[in-house]
Image (tube, coloured by chain):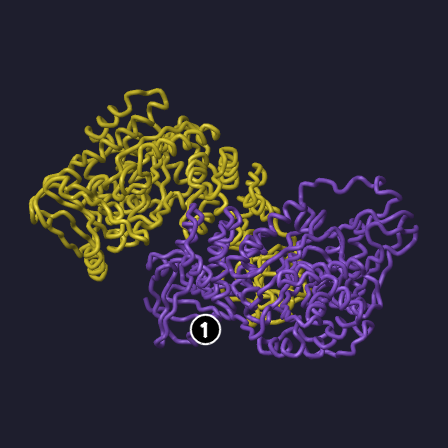
Chain colours: A yellow, B purple
Amino acid sequence: MRLKTKLLDIQAGEALVAVLNKDDASELGLMAVDRVRLSAGGKEIVAILDVATETVKKGEVGLYQELRKIFGEPQEIEVLPAHKPSSVRFITDRIRGRMLQPAELRQIISDVMDRSLSSLEIAAFITSLEMRPPSMDEAEAITRAMVDLGQTLEWDRHPIFDKHSIGGVPGDKTTMILVPTVASLGLTIPKTSSRAITSPAGTADRVETLCPVELTLEEIREVVAKTNGCMAWGGAVDLAPADDLLIQVEYPLSIDPLYLPSVLGKKKAAGADYIVIDLPTGKGAKLSTVEEANEFGRDFIRLGRRLGLHVQCGITFGEQPVGNNVGPALEAREALETLMGKKSTPDLVEKAASLVGILLRMSGDHRGKRKALEAIRSGKAERKMRQIIEAQGGDPDVKPEDIPIGEHTLEIPSPCSGQVVWVNNHNIVALARSLGTPKHRGAGLCIPKKMGDKVRKGDTILRLYAEKASSLARAEKLLEDLEPVMVAEKLADRVLIREVVEVPEVPFTIER
Amino acid sequence: MRLKTKLLDIQAGEALVAVLNKDDASELGLMAVDRVRLSAGGKEIVAILDVATETVKKGEVGLYQELRKIFGEPQEIEVLPAHKPSSVRFITDRIRGRMLQPAELRQIISDVMDRSLSSLEIAAFITSLEMRPPSMDEAEAITRAMVDLGQTLEWDRHPIFDKHSIGGVPGDKTTMILVPTVASLGLTIPKTSSRAITSPAGTADRVETLCPVELTLEEIREVVAKTNGCMAWGGAVDLAPADDLLIQVEYPLSIDPLYLPSVLGKKKAAGADYIVIDLPTGKGAKLSTVEEANEFGRDFIRLGRRLGLHVQCGITFGEQPVGNNVGPALEAREALETLMGKKSTPDLVEKAASLVGILLRMSGDHRGKRKALEAIRSGKAERKMRQIIEAQGGDPDVKPEDIPIGEHTLEIPSPCSGQVVWVNNHNIVALARSLGTPKHRGAGLCIPKKMGDKVRKGDTILRLYAEKASSLARAEKLLEDLEPVMVAEKLADRVLIREVVEVPEVPFTIER
């Protein structure tokens, strides 16, 4: 069927889509989401069919911008029915109960990356994985496909060390201590990190207040050659890129069944040998109980072993922020102050050193934790940090107070004397987001007192920072309904942890 | 955030969608498929967010045609983040294992109808229903929501009789015999039927070659008042309309988990009291075994009882077409010839009469089958058929040969003598579709010999009809790979039923 092209000044978004009038679609025996083969000027492509009743007339084919980039703007296009990709059948098979073969899963991942699948087909696949979790065989196949179909980093030197946190704890700037510490010990740790999606700050957001993080693979190599380490944004390099496309479906559905393949795929693509996984656990963390964290950690280890990766996990206390600050710039300041010995953040140092201990033990060195504490205490880690900042294009002499933070501030006093008995991570996140994080790098908050700390009535228990007065006002309003830091004379004075409400107050978080 | 409107000359299709530039979306803390509240000129609506990088610039909001119909074309629109509908949370809950409450399912169906859910969210819901089928409580709630949220037919007279076939057998024109037969017995049967989606002909397509079928509810009432029956297209009346929207997701995924609610919802909305369900069973039918059909039929009966409907089912032989003809016009001719006694179609008459027997038995009349056979034999059913045709706006004196059929024909001779040992429904469907059905009303085919019939070498075992020479050529080409009618000297001569191939040859069918 030869049809006149109608150029649509809009992107289809997630897939290659051509629009036909419903009469022409019916003439071809096709319905929406069926496939059509388009040919013009010697080019041929299979697109997903969309059906319009009015805006595309009989005799026309509507081309979204993605297809215009392929075809240019021909007068006419030949449109014929095409088979659906075999991956659609595999998805249906899996919904109906069949576990998939490696080659089939690879085809699905490949078609996701080629934009050959519609978002509803990908949603069905993701839903099937959430309802019947991937077997280890399936998880391995998906991970390998993700790795093979993206860029990879190869290293001359080995072993390569790496670290990942499942997140969920606001203010967790451990990576900014751990990476320079490991690198300062002469070990190689080319770390890529994510930006915040639903949290107040990702490591990439924090580091970016000190130096550029959008490095190419070549730049990562150069930085690592100079310093043994780096702290780059993973999104700038195409390591296991299928994940970004899958997140676009997982996030709207609030499900994340490919978390393990996604994390370990990126580590495999980055060429890692030894990986420590941080599993913050407890009330208000992603994992509620140690048992749950144990099981999850073992899955990490098992999948890692299948991929030829050495993985060990640390279950860490996740019921309150690490250190005191939350927000990209505030956390960068705190990390720098910690490395400089200008600020005491015992939980941050202890956490970083413990994870270094696990990491080095995998390579046969049982004195990792002690070495880490010494590197931090001695200023060796700070010097390494400044080398990395310089190699990535930042100012190696940066002082904490050089990092700009929000000028609109507000201090919240404690309503009574006693001790901090409870910090609510979810409230901290909501408050920090309302202050403008992660978009506003200088926004955020500080909790000067942590769980167990003594507090007198009127002491500041919360300091808010915003770049705009309107953000501060919004946060102040929100605070009326929240209690991020709970003070009581004795623990027993505040026994009500949370009310059970019908509508969940905890938002879905997706972070990599 | 106030944004300049950019008018998009295209329909979003399944949902209300507004497009923002990714920078503005990020400024609002939003990702694709999040929701935005749009306000302009005193109107306010929540739309699904789509994110563009180029075609919608920073500071602009792109409006698809559906939103232009609501807002007109204002210069600017206020855009703010909005909560997702609660139904999205219910869908996520169900994916995670929670059975839903009636009010929650009702909200989902309602939001589907309001176009408040994106296709990926609906796909996740449908996938969850396929993987963990609805409980009877859930099925009842979904059905009631479908009924309550659409139009319904109320009748002064009772009881109202109705019939449904799960389909899957080509050439099944039983409804065209059954409806006039029941109506000729003085009973009320306001039958609505579907058009073909993936089959060669639906009842609405067949009847439309005799008279109009796109009747309004008022016209249905008038026809039934005059004749006791009707044969209208269900799609023209809004009975349980959510189903049409759900099919747009079920069909691409080749799953159909809401079949029972969809069928009984339409029957409930049509005001039916007694319903007979035809369950064609056997090789090449939708249900393969009698056991499977039994189980499926019992679910129909149970759900019916919860809805206050009397349902009984007939398991019928479904391994070959009913009668000889396949294709809208060819089947209408055959139905008319059968009622006129001009053609012998024993299986068609037996099937229609048996189902009438089941139907009448529910109302306490145990002589239904005998009465039906007598009504057909005596010409009473034919006279009623002509009354219905006239009441619907057709020619009551229509002769079978008045119904136009394809002029391009081809006869296929038997390659040997013997008997028909096997008819392949799927091949019949593929062949009929390639000839142009259901779009080309006169296209189709005839199998003059049925299973068990004696055949001599050279006898016609297949007659093809097409409206276009090109369709006939395409079908002839396809026939090289198919064997719709298999002839052998003895049954034992052809023991190979089918080869097992990796890629399934049987297409997914969705019919209502």
Residue displayed at 78% across by 57% down: B347
> Number of marks in the image?
1
Residue displayed at 68% across by 49% down: B506
**The quarter of the displayed image where residue B444 is located:** bottom right
- Which quarter shows the N terminus of chain A? bottom right
Q: Position of residue B234 (x, y in %)?
A: 61, 68
The amino acid type of the residue labelled 1 equals: Arg
Q: Judge from the rendering whether residue B133 lies leftward or rightward of residue B415; answer left or right.
A: left
- Which quarter shows the C terminus of chain A? top left
**The quarter of the displayed image where residue B31 is located:** bottom left
Residue displayed at 48% across by 70% down: B66
The chain identifier of the residue carrying mark 1 reads: B
Q: Which element type, helix, strand or loop, lies under badge 1? A: helix
Residue displayed at 24% across by 48% down: A428
Position above or below: A169 against B449? above
Position above or below: B292 against B58? above
Q: Position of residue A456 (x, y in %)?
A: 7, 44
Q: Position of residue B206 (x, y in %)?
A: 72, 67
**The quarter of the displayed image where residue B108 is located:** bottom left
Q: From the viewer's side, name the closer residue of B75 and B217.
A: B217
User: Label 1: how many residues lie within 10 Å, few (<14), some (14-19) or many (20+)?
Assistant: some
Position above or below: B337 against B251? below
Q: From the viewer's side, name the closer residue of A93 and A478.
A: A93
Q: Judge from the rendering whether residue A238 lies leftward or rightward of residue B38; answer left or right.
A: right
Q: In the rendered image, which residue does mark 1 sit on?
A: B68
Q: Is residue B135 visible?
A: yes
Position above or below: A152 against B238? above
Q: Is residue A79 visible?
A: no
